[in-house]
Image: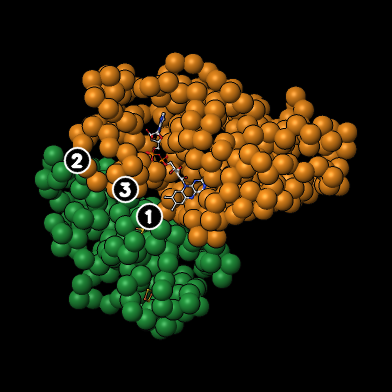
Amino acid sequence: MKISFTINGKQETGEVEPRTLLVEFIRYELGLTGTHVGCDTSQCGACTIHMNGRSVKACTLLAAQADGQDITTIEGVAPADGPLHPMQEAFRDNHGLQCGFCTPGMIMSALAMVERHNGEALDEQTIREELEGNLCRCTGYQGIVKAIEAGSKAMQGAPDVQF
Amino acid sequence: MYNFKYKKVSSLDEAQQAFDAADDGTFMAGGMTLIPTMKQRLAMPSDVIDLGGIDGLSGISVDGGTVTVGAMTCHADVAASEGVQKAIPALAHLASLIGDPQVRNRGTIGGSIANNDPASDYPGALVGLSATVHTTKKKIAADDFFTDLFETALEEGELITKVTFPAPKIAAYRKFPNPASRYSVVGAFVAKTKDGIRVAITGAGPTVFRVSEMEQALTSSFNADAISNISVPADNLNGDLHATAEYRAHLIGVMVKRAISDCG
Ligand SMILES: Cc1cc2nc3c(=O)[nH]c(=O)nc-3n(C[C@H](O)[C@H](O)[C@H](O)COP(=O)(O)OP(=O)(O)OC[C@H]3O[C@@H](n4cnc5c(N)ncnc54)[C@H](O)[C@@H]3O)c2cc1C
Ligand code: FES
Ligand code: FES
């Protein structure tokens, strides 16, 4: 079947089987390999992307369900050769990653969190509660929580940053 | 997962026709249970009928003392709804405790109650508030809807369209979540409704149930001490790697007491 959607501002069209997962289409057909598959069982959040501005797990969506929708992946949060998004920068500054496998999902969840709270700076408790859907096997989360706190603050001073 | 035919429908009639035409069709809401089940090959439908394109199946309205939630409304929307937060704060709170933000962005009330996972939260609110499930064939009281483990009063091809909740005088939901999945090990929904007190327990048994002994005790005296001497026998409760039946029986008392204190 044919599907077509907007991803990172670009219109894409493709031919998929009904059982093709959205994450498979994004990684293998579109070559956007920033979206990871950690568990494939809806638990780890490494595959988190935004669909119509909301965070979702791309391993638990059929590509067919994304037909006509607006998708953003980690590749879409900052220009390829430009400066990092303030949230990405905050992960770098605050030791928010070790191996980096969970990071794209963490950042997509963090941006959705800021969005849900109308762009306000986030406190530790909110971050810990709302990070429920993302697992990290390396950091012990301290650096990630600090990074999101700092990232949400940095976004205050950057009004034209998206999300 | 095995392959299947996929069809996105745009009306209830079209959904029904697609279901009738299929060998072994299934409806899909957000797919939050259906897709994992198909990946494990525990479900192998010939046709998946996506309800995502039907206008009017999602949305919340509050009218007088009734909150209406469309079947395709996701948990995040119920949790964030100012109308629900005002009319039945316990319902918004319950929705905010389901899974994680990504699950709440996709999972729906219709999919959750049609599936009737024993560890799911919504059955507690439906029975605790004496809600009504509206389908393409009938209206059915929550007390009669959840029949057994993963079983409901829905017939083949019958679609849930919405759920109506009468606003209680006061209500609260407390759950002991599984620390990994957040599904409830035990959840207790306590409500003072206009027809009396309700205590609905989810997570603990094969399906949601009421504890009439606690309801009676709370009718005479609405405070946590009133149920101190009431215990639910472990005999028919679930025991699994997460918790034994005896531990669940104990948690019922604890969660009900906490919910009563939340009622203030
Ligand atoms: C990681 C994770 C954690 C979770 N944690 C919790 C939790 O803590 N508490 C909790 O309660 N739940 C939890 N869930 C379940 C989640 O809340 C979803 O509501 C549930 O999975 C149903 O998903 P869905 O609405 O997308 O339905 P689907 O998966 O699309 O459908 C589920 C079933 O319902 C049927 N169905 C769907 N809509 C209708 C309808 N309108 N009429 C008739 N039949 C219909 C489908 O045919 C299918 O059989 C969790 C899920 C995941 C993946
Ligand atoms: S890969 Fe999707 S949640 Fe783990
Ligand atoms: S940094 Fe390795 S999994 Fe999170």
Drawing shade for chain B: orange
Tag 2 residue: B3
What's the amino acid at mark 1?
Ser
Between the residue at mark 1 and the residue at mark 3, the CA separation in whole angstroms equals 12 Å
**Quadrant location, the C terminus of chain A:** bottom left
Q: At x 58% / y 49%, what residue is drawn?
A: B239
Q: Is residue A26 left or right of residue B186?
A: left
Can you tell which chain is drawn green? Answer: A
Label for residue A42?
1
What secondary structure is found at the residue carrying circle 2? Answer: loop
Front disc: 2 or 1? 2
Between the residue at mark 2 and the residue at mark 1, the CA separation in whole angstroms equals 20 Å
Viewer-side residue, B221 vs B70: B221
Give the quarter the ligand 1 occupies.
top left
Residue A131 appears anywhere in the view:
yes
Circle 2 chain: B
| Location of residue B26 in the rendering, given as x and y in whole percent from the top left corner | 32, 31
Tag 3 residue: B40
Q: At x 34% / y 31%, what residue is drawn?
A: B27
